[in-house]
Amino acid sequence: MIAAEEPLSHVAYVYDGTPEGLFTAVFQAYANHEDPEDIARESSFQPRLGQSVRTIESDAKLAERVKRGLVRTTGKAGFNAVLHASLSDDAQAGTVVYRFIRYAMRADVRQAAIGEIAHPAVAPLVALDRSVMNERHYLQQFLRFERLEGNVWFARCSPKASVVPLLMGWFSARFNDAPFMIYDEAHRIAGIYDGSGWQLVQADEVNLPEKAGDEEMMQQAWKRFYDAVSVDARYHPELRRQFMPKRFWKHMPEMDERGDASTGAYSLNTPSRSKAGMKLSSAAPPSCQK
């Protein structure tokens, strides 16, 4: 039995930033008979004037109860939308998820809730769901692995949402003949596949073995392939940035402008143009921004 605390009318819930922490906060709001004004990550929370704050400790059992309740009442589609929104970096993500759950749990809404995309409690959740899944789709295209000593593959990324949990199942189903790691620098999360299953690890940094002996050659091959398929008559840098946002370039070997010009690699300070006319900017290193 969960002991309820004295209800507060002007309160915010603060959680650890994980989906489990958010689901625990939702559970505690019902248990405490409270309607929090805000449910926010501890790392980004700014309290309002005169607002009381409850710090919610993540509880896997309580989070699982919320998950089961969501699947039962809103269906798998509703739960997936909530899960994806909870991985967003948007400061309002926790509150958006909570408002949707309060609305969806009403007896006269339930399974139909996620389809009411014009409702003020549903539209923000759908927008966050779409944004997170777009980020996942980008990384499915632009994530690049490098081979390390010991035949371990490693990829680094800095996404705008914590999408590594959504990527691991997809990559482990297609890249299952060798262990690999995907490290999210922005959220300090590593997804590790050991050849049979995967897990998530919170890590401020990763210590990696040396690159495999032929990895530099393979990265140069990426650059040559990129040049070979470019078409001078269709050179369109604005369109390229639209379909391949510049914030991903720093982790893509074909877009890496660092290197030694004497070896044929791109130089940061010397503009270069391929035979097909694809000019590479030399003004600055690839930016994290779009």
Image (cartoon, helix red, strand yellow):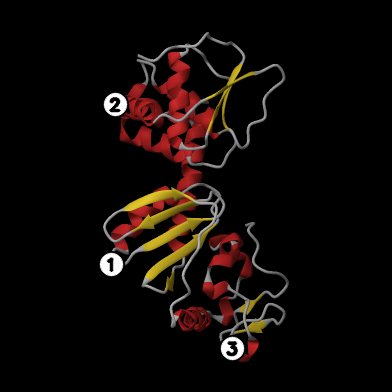
Q: In 3D space, how far apart are the residues under numbered discs 3 and 2 (Cα atoms)?
A: 59 Å
Tag 2 near tag 1, CB within 8 Å: no
| Number of other residues with Cα within 10 Å of mark 3, as a class: few under 14, some 14 to 19, many 20 or more | few
Q: Which callout, 3 or 2, points at the residue further toward the start of the chain?
A: 2
Where does the image place residue 92, in percent across and percent down from the top left?
Answer: 58, 33
In this view, the residue in front, 211 or 159, is 211
Horizontal arrangement in the rendering, residue 249 relative to residue 48 (left or right): left
Q: Which callout, 2 or 1, points at the residue further toward the start of the chain?
A: 2
Q: Type of residue at label 1?
A: Asp
Where does the image place residue 222, in percent across and percent down from the top left?
Answer: 48, 78
Where does the image place residue 22, in percent across and percent down from the top left?
Answer: 47, 31
Task: Identify residue for label 2.
Answer: 72
Q: Type of residue at label 2?
A: Arg
Task: Identify residue for label 1.
Answer: 177
Residue at the spot 41% in from the left edge and 54% down from the top edge: 191
In this view, the residue in front, 272 or 286, is 286
**Which marked residue is nearer to the observer: mark 3 or mark 2?**
3
